[in-house]
Image (cartoon, rainbow, N blue to C red):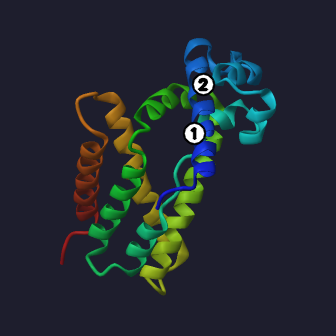
Amino acid sequence: MTLPLRERRRLETANEIQRATLRLAAERGLDHVTTEAIAAEAGISLRTFFNYYTNKEAASVGNPPLFSEDSCEALRTGSAPLADDLKRFLDAHLASLAGSEEIIRSLGPIIRENGRVRWLLDQHLHSLRDDLADCLDTRLPGTPRAMTQELADWSLQGIGTAIDRWLADDGRTLQAALDEVWHAKLAAARLVVPAP
């Protein structure tokens, strides 16, 4: 689906503000960056900055992608083994990050240094976890919510671990890192619960 021009421009402005924030944070450290400096770097007014983000921490995190409705529907109604459908779901989400590699790399140091940024990202991840658990509730009717949330956490940790491995090794793609991590997660699960 193609976004209307106005929405595309809004998204481009939000992304430029985020990139400007990350550039300045890399140079000075986020604690030493002001919203005025970010606005100037992005070529916008301070008022425009605040139309997009509440503070510099929110601008550094930007607007991470949510799960697509198509992916959610495919997981809710899928008939393949759950592990296969979950992997396709994670692959689709990873594909939505394509083109954001520079942002992901730039965010790493800021997340480690700034508790507020880490908290904002954690809030986004909790929201993703709940959305994935909702999909799993539909896919696995009668399963206790605590179990679908745990399965959602377990699955999303795969993306986090893949990103960590990808950041540590420039030679592999993010998709290759997720494939490797997913294979290891399934193998580890079989150790805990051997096949009958």
Marking on residue 12: 1
Does residue 178 appear to the left or right of 34 in the view shown? left
The structure residue drawn at horizontal position 24% and vertical position 35%, both measured from the top left corner, is 172
The structure residue drawn at horizontal position 26% and vertical position 77%, both measured from the top left corner, is 80
Does residue 44 appear to the left or right of 72 in the view shown? right
Extreme front residue here? 5
Q: Residues within 10 Å of mark 1 (few under 14, many from 20)?
A: few
Front residue of 192/174: it is: 174
Three-letter code for the amino acid on which mark 2 is drawn: Ala
Return the disc, 1 or 2, that comes first in the chain's sequence.
Answer: 1
Q: Quadrant of residue 189?
A: bottom left
Dot 1 falls on a residue whose secondary structure is: helix
**Percent position of residue 178, x then y:** 30, 48
Extreme left residue here? 196
**Percent position of residue 44, x then y:** 71, 27
The answer to whether residue 147 of the structure is visible from this angle is no
Asked if 118 appears above or below 142 in the picture, the reply is: above
Three-letter code for the amino acid on which mark 1 is drawn: Glu
**Percent position of residue 171, x then y:** 23, 29
* The C terminus: image quadrant: bottom left
The structure residue drawn at horizontal position 23% and vertical position 47%, both measured from the top left corner, is 180
The answer to whether residue 111 of the structure is visible from this angle is yes
Marking on residue 20: 2
